[in-house]
């Protein structure tokens, strides 16, 4: 059974710091991995999608890496800003019960202090 | 090009009433997925539908919950005789193909409160 764990559960940092959010998964047979951002009371915004054959993806100040063999992904946020405060969710997609679906981690709650 | 539309955004129901949550996928997307997020928990898969077919309902509670995606109109998640434990955020996602490399696009969710 695929399990997705995100560490740390919560993080508070001063503005300007570079930070790393971690995601680990127990089954390396994944189709892809997606990082999402969720603001309080809001929906999910896709940040980065990494296919199983890729090692990393970048968008602006965000960089996500994927190491399938070790079951890990990291989301790197450079020069953090108060507007980055949100919950960050990692989700792995794999075939279970014959269909593709995402398994989500419980998220990392990030607070960037001005 | 509107994204995934869910309505209502907020829904309050008394115990024993029925809740109907609607999801209109993105244009060109024929695959719909429903997820539930309980307070302080991660998103859990509920059901995967294509037009007029339920493909995978392995995450649906055995009783009171049902889902449909008719040929015309939005996908509906229906919860009968709601209980306080049904209070959660319900998210819908869509994709153009079951194995789309593009991943999912999520709606903003419906927050159900049972009083």
Image: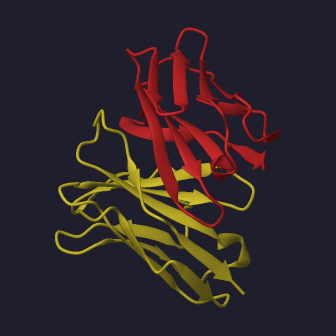
Chain colours: A red, B yellow
* Residue B104 seen in the current view: yes
On the image, the x and y values in percent for residue B22 come to: 39, 75
* Residue A1 seen in the current view: no
Say how many tags the image has: 0
**Residue at x-position 81% and y-position 40%:** A14
On the image, the x and y values in percent for residue B85 come to: 71, 71
Q: A94 or A34, which is in the foreground?
A: A34
Relative to B95, residue B91 above or below: below
Quadrant of the rendered image containing residue A75: top right
Relative to B18, residue B77 above or below: above
The N terminus of chain B is located in which quarter? bottom left
Quadrant of the rendered image containing residue B67: bottom left
On the image, the x and y values in percent for residue B62 come to: 54, 62
**Residue at x-position 57% and y-position 59%:** B36
A109 lies left or right of A34: right
**Residue at x-position 72% and y-position 87%:** B115
**Residue at x-position 61% and y-position 27%:** A76
B97 lies left or right of B46: left
On the image, the x and y values in percent for residue B40 come to: 75, 56
B38 lies left or right of B89: right
């Amino acid at each position: 059974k695929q399990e997705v764990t995100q560490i740390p559960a919560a993080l508070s940092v001063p503005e300007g710091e570079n930070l790393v959010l971690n995601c680990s998964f127990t089954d390396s047979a994944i189709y892809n991995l997606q990082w999402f951002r969720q603001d309080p009371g809001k929906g999910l915004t896709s940040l980065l999608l990494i296919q199983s054959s890729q090692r990393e993806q970048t968008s602006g100040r965000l960089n996500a890496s994927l190491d399938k063999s070790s079951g890990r992904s990291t989301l790197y946020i450079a020069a953090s800003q108060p507007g980055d405060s949100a919950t960050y969710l990692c989700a792995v997609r794999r075939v279970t019960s014959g269909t593709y679906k995402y398994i989500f981690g419980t998220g990392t709650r990030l607070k960037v202090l001005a | 090009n509107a994204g995934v539309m869910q309505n209502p955004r907020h829904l309050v129901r008394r115990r024993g009433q029925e809740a109907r949550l609607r999801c209109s996928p993105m244009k060109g997307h024929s695959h719909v997925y429903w997820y539930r997020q309980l307070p302080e928990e991660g998103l859990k898969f509920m059901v995967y539908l294509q037009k007029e077919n339920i493909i995978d309902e392995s995450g649906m509670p055995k009783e009171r919950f049902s889902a449909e995606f008719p040929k015309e109109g939005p996908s509906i998640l229906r919860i009968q005789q709601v209980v306080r434990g049904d209070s959660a955020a319900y998210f819908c996602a869509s994709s153009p193909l079951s194995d789309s490399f593009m991943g999912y696009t999520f709606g903003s969710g419906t927050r159900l409160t049972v009083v």
